[in-house]
Image (cartoon, rainbow, N blue to C red):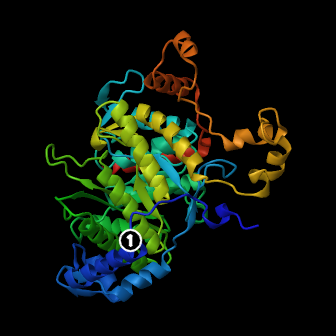
Amino acid sequence: MRVNYNVNATPRFRMLSHDQCDEIYGSALKVLYHTGVKVHSEETLDLLCKSGVQVKGNRAYIPSFVVKKALDTATKSFTVYGRGEDDSNHIDVRPDHIHYGLGSGCVYFMDPRTGKRRNYTREDAATVARVADALPNIDFVQPLGTVPVDPEMVDVYEFAEMVANTSKPLVTYSRTLGITKTIHKIAMAVAGGEEAFIRRPNFLLLGSPGSPLFADAEPSRRVIYCAEHHIPYISTSAVTCGATTPVTAAGTLVQVVAEELMELVINQSANPGAPFLMGGVLSLMDMKSGILAYGAPEMNKLLAAHTEIARHMGLAFYSTAGCSDSKIVDEQAAIEGALSVMTSGLSGANMIHDVGYIEFGSTGSLQQTVMMDEAIDMVKHFLRGISVTKETMALDLIDRVGPGGQYLDDMHTAEHFKTEFWFPSLMDRSHWDQWAAEGEKTLGDRVQEKLDHILDTHKALSLPEQVQNEIDSILADAAARQ
């Protein structure tokens, strides 16, 4: 029997038609060849020249055949692994596999106990990883903040705290090539060496091309290093419509696709076959406040379209969701966060980050993370679609029960309701009297209770002592060089 979930495994909507995707992709190719990109690195320019790119001064003009070759060679489907004996925490980066995770880079942090906004600390990176480790619908981990230390050690300390406090795969940013190398050393220590890391990579490196249309020297070196060492690289344009890209959605998409294809060409020129993802943080500049709006519907529209263009080119996509412009975790945060979680999932994005952002990416919140974990669970249930089989269509059951009967005490109901129905852990479905008797708790109250319980009880899988000692030595060497 032909069943619909074999044909369409994930319910999905379309923001763009096939022709529109092709038009934007073709226009991005025109921009790369006719307008070109600025590349502020002689090493990168030399690499591009060898790949067939035309270079005049620091301007690189990339022909479409070079782009298409890079698209052909890039590894588009791969697995990123967590720690532990089994592979229960691994994530498959491939079509119809959708994973949610945290973001990084927030300056402020909502205290997980008091709910008060304060500066982020190194200890918070460990706490964030431990809470994410406990949440069943958070699939990969980022630090949700920025440790206030020497810039050369920020990303290193964050990565070290995360890898010690979660067994889930990691996504990390690095400000310099030196930081990238140090993080890679830590990752290899955890994996068991360089060859073991190549077989079972445990992190992805998050980068971003310059907007509009340039590649600085240090980011290009990171792109090349990742390619050479088989580190999965995420090229994520973070742009503001009307400021760093055209105000129109189509113009923004043309530019960011061109920018990310530029990094793809650099990446594949360094090592054909290196794993590569496109990504995006695309939204408008609010003309009243000047912020990049994380809760705007325009962000959801742009990212859904960006995802479709990536799929059109055969690439996996790293999207954004679970975030809000609200200053606290309130009704606004719930609406904006849940809407983006749903639209990003329906778009078919493969990795979806920034869960836990509030205050337009300025503040990280574990309260928001816990609340969005519930929203993600709802969306994942929705994305399962509907199984249409002889068993689920239940013709024999309908005939047996017949007109005027009931299904509550039938074995078919007992066998299937736990998989057919979604069961909330935070949403309240009780009668009024029961709700009142239990303290008239709001969703916010239940979120804080769940967060407190995780903080009080959850312990992540510990690193082996020899691995922790090796990481400590790597950190000491890195700090001594500053």
Task: Choose between 422 and 67: the one closer to the eye.
Answer: 422
Q: Residue at x 33, y 45 (%)?
A: 105
The residue under the point 59% across, 55% down is: 81
The residue shown at (23%, 70%) is 214
Q: Residues within 10 Å of mark 1 (few under 14, many from 20)?
A: many
Q: Is residue 383 above or below residue 374?
A: below
Residue tagged 1: 224
Q: Does residue 25 appear in the picture of this structure?
A: yes
Image location of residue 423, percent across then percent down = 62, 35
Q: Residue furthest left?
A: 288
Q: Position of residue 330 (x, y in %)?
A: 36, 29
Front residue of 100/106: it is 100
Q: Quadrant of the N terminus?
A: bottom right
The secondary structure type at the circle numbered 1 is helix
> Of the residues shown, which amino acid type is indicated by label 1?
Ile
Q: Nearer the viewer, residue 379 or 388?
A: 388
| Residue farthest to the top, as pictured | 437
From the viewer's perspective, tell me whether residue 189 is left or right of residue 482: right
Name of the residue lying farthest toward the front: 403
User: Can residue 474 be seen here?
Assistant: no
Q: x, y percentage for residue 7? A: 63, 67
Please count the marks in the image.
1
Q: Where is 454 relative to 20, above or below?
A: above
Q: Is residue 169 above or below residue 436?
A: below
Question: Which residue is painted at 26% across and 63% down in the image?
Answer: 249
